[in-house]
Every structure is written in structure tokens, then in C-alpha cells.
Image (cartoon, rainbow, N blue to C red):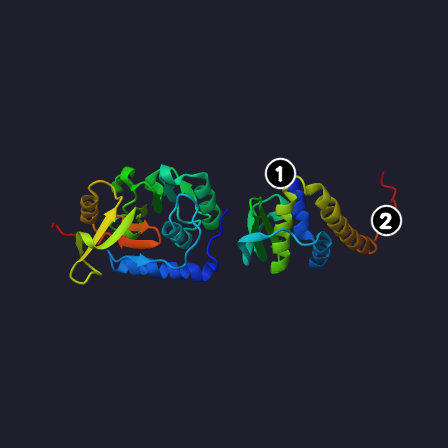
């Protein structure tokens, strides 16, 4: 299990909308019993950016983030950090993170949970981009014969 | 990974009040009731004190006995505490084998202008017994009190006396045994008898 895979599914779980995650949660049924190691708890994270994308770093502002860490009996530690204050979302994302770290469960979960959530997000972003593209205006200038 | 306090706010407040009581009444043994599952080889009181007092701004020095993978991971996860190699850079020290610990002078004793910038040493000992052992006096102690510490470094009370000689500089000691805690701030005076 590589870090790259884990980053991707943690990102997909965190960026899903609460409704989408709820639907995915229903699909997988009840998870095995787990213990909460930390949270879910809401805190603030300072977002940093670079001026102009490449310049000096500065503080953009604070955003609320909900984090959660859960552990299955004799299993992996699942963690989640989700923007916003949705404690249930963070807890479910953490449980799914723990389940996905299990090599036996991963393929099924990737197919039934992660891929649909990733496609849903792409569709959402695609809709926004399409709406914005519809407002695009192409400018043309007449050649003035200078060269 | 073991969890921390069931309720982080109430748990740490409870433990903080106990630590305050112990520090304000040197030699008094207090029992912590906000008990948590401590990672091996920490005792419940040591772990609770760490959760309450340590954070990302308080560098921690661990002795060899405390550097178990479970303990280090637990401290990093729950406290976010930076670990330091040299005792002189630590704000807190967690010593699980006090018999082999460095001399108090190797830790930060603070300065005359800022004596509060010193280290607080958490020593995990075998047992704390009231009414026996060394006779203690000083601020916070009405008349005198007695405290016996099993599992302390050799010549422990001489070390405590020596620590008090640097006043206002010096270290402060928190002794943890099981779920119990006692404190020996630098103001405590050890009687000769």
C-alpha cells in the first residue's frame, strides 16, 4: 500500500459532499466495531498562500477543520481531516480510511466508494467549469496593416 | 494507538487542578481520577500529566526507558510535543528510570531574570508514601510533612537540597507513581533528620 494511494483516497473522502458520503456509507453496510482515538473535534487551521502563487508566504485566513482518528480492534489507525464542522463526515471518512488500509477490503471499497465519489466530484467541477465557459467572450481585433 | 482523555477539556482541567494542588502543597500525594490507558511503559499519572502539560511549544526530553515506540508515537500524536536529544533544551523531561537519570544541573535551571524558563522533571517512581521518609518544610507546607519515594535516584534528598540552593533558579519535580502524583518545587526544604 503506497502513500500515494492513501493520499488519493483520503482526499476523495474529504472532498466528497456529506450527502454523497452518506450514500456511500449506506452502501457498505455496518463497519466492524471501532474505537475513537481522537475526536471528532473541530478546530481552526491557518491557510497559507504565496503572493502571486510563487512569492512570499502569507496567511490567507483561518478555516474550520474537523479531524477524527479511529482504530479497529487490532487494526490500522484511520484518520481524516475535513474542511468544515461536520463531525459525522470526519468520523465516517476516518473509518473508511482505516478500512481502506486493509489489503483485503481495499479493492471492493475502491470500486464501491472511492471511484463513485471521485467521479461525482469530477462531475460537479465539470458542471461549474461548463457554466463558467458559457460566459466566455472571445475578443478579436482587426488587423491594422502595421507589418 | 491508545486514546487520550475521554473529554480532552474536562480531563486536562481536572489533571491540571491536581498538579496545581501538588505543587502548591509540596509533598502532598494527590490521586488522579481522570484515568486514561497509558502507553507502555508510562504509568497512568505520568501519561495524564503529559497530556495536560505538553504541547507543541514545550520541548520534551525522554530518557532511554521512555523511548519505546508506543510511548513516542502516543506523545507525538496526542500532545504534538517536539522531542529533543539534549536535556538542556527541554522544557519538560519524562524520566521512567530515575535511578539512571542525568544530574538535575544538566537540565535548564532558568536564569535569575527568568527563573520560570526552567525545566519541569516528571519522574516515574515505584511508590509514594506519606507519613514516612524525608521531612519536608517550606512554602505550602504547614509545619512539616513527610514523604517517602521508592525508586528515586540515589542520594535523592541530597539532590533536592542541592536544587534548592540555586533559588530562584532550579528545576521543579513531579513524582508519578501509578495514579498518584506528588510535587517537589524548588522551594521545598529537606530537613536533616
Question: Would you say B49 lies left or right of A75 here?
Answer: left
Residue B162 visible from this viewpoint? yes
For the residue pair A50 and A21, the one nearer the viewer reads as A21
For the residue pair B127 and B190, the one nearer the viewer reads as B127
Question: Would you say B145 lies left or right of A67 here?
Answer: left
**Callout 2 secondary element:** loop
Given the current orientation, which residue lies at the most extreme left position? Answer: B193
Residue B169 visible from this viewpoint? no
Pinpoint residue A48: horizontal percent, then vertical percent: 57, 50
Q: Quadrant of residue B97?
A: top left
Pinpoint residue B86: horizontal percent, then vertical percent: 35, 38
For the residues carrying marks 2 and 1, which lies nearer the camera in this image?
1
Question: Would you say A69 lies left or right of B42 here?
Answer: right
Instruction: Write the residue at 60% across / 52% down.
Output: A33
Which label belongs to residue A32? none
Which label belongs to residue A3? 1
Separation of residues labelled 2 and 1 (CA atoms) = 48 Å
Question: Would you say B105 lies left or right of A130 here?
Answer: left
**Callout 1 secondary element:** helix
Instruction: Write the residue at 76% across / 52% down.
Output: A120
Instruction: Write the residue at 49% across / 49% down.
Output: B2
- Mark 2: give few (<14), some (14-19) or many (20+) Cα within 10 Å: few
Pinpoint residue B167: horizontal percent, then vertical percent: 21, 51
**Residue hosting label 2:** A140
Q: Are the residues under badges 2 and 1 in a single subunit? A: yes
Name the subunit of mark 2: A
Up-down relation of residue A14 to residue B142 (above or below): above
Amino acid at each position: 500500500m503506497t502513500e500515494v494511494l492513501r493520499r488519493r483516497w483520503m482526499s476523495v473522502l474529504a472532498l466528497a459532499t456529506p450527502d454523497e458520503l452518506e450514500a456511500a456509507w449506506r452502501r457498505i453496510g455496518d463497519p466492524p466495531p471501532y474505537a475513537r482515538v481522537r475526536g471528532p473535534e473541530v478546530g481552526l487551521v491557518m491557510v497559507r498562500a504565496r503572493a502571486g502563487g510563487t512569492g512570499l508566504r502569507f496567511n490567507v485566513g483561518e478555516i474550520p477543520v474537523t479531524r477524527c482518528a479511529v482504530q479497529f480492534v487490532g487494526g490500522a489507525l484511520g484518520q481524516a481531516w475535513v474542511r468544515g464542522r461536520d463531525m459525522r463526515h470526519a468520523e465516517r471518512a476516518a473509518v473508511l480510511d482505516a478500512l481502506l488500509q486493509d489489503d483485503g477490503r481495499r479493492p471492493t471499497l475502491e470500486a464501491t466508494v472511492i471511484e463513485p465519489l471521485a467521479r461525482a466530484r469530477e462531475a460537479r467541477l465539470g458542471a461549474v467549469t461548463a457554466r463558467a465557459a458559457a460566459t466566455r467572450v472571445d475578443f478579436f481585433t482587426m488587423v491594422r496593416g502595421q507589418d | 494507538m491508545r486514546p487520550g482523555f475521554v473529554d480532552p477539556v474536562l480531563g486536562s482541567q481536572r489533571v491540571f487542578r491536581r498538579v496545581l494542588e501538588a505543587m502548591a502543597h509540596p509533598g502532598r500525594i494527590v490521586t488522579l481520577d481522570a484515568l486514561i490507558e497509558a502507553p507502555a511503559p508510562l504509568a497512568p499519572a505520568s501519561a495524564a500529566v503529559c497530556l495536560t502539560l505538553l504541547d507543541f511549544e514545550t520541548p520534551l526530553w525522554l530518557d532511554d526507558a521512555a523511548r519505546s515506540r508506543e510511548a513516542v508515537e502516543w506523545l507525538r500524536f496526542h500532545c504534538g510535543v517536539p522531542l529533543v536529544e539534549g536535556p538542556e533544551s527541554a522544557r519538560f523531561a519524562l524520566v521512567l528510570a530515575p535511578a539512571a537519570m542525568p544530574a538535575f544541573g544538566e537540565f535548564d535551571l532558568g536564569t535569575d531574570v527568568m527563573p520560570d524558563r526552567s525545566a519541569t522533571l516528571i519522574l516515574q517512581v515505584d511508590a509514594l508514601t506519606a507519613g514516612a521518609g524525608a521531612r519536608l518544610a517550606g512554602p505550602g507546607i504547614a509545619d512539616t510533612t513527610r514523604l517517602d519515594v521508592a525508586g528515586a535516584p540515589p542520594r535523592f534528598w541530597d539532590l533536592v537540597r542541592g536544587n534548592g540552593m540555586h533559588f530562584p533558579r532550579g528545576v521543579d519535580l513531579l513524582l508519578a507513581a501509578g495514579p498518584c502524583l506528588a510535587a517537589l518545587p524548588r522551594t521545598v526544604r529537606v530537613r536533616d533528620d
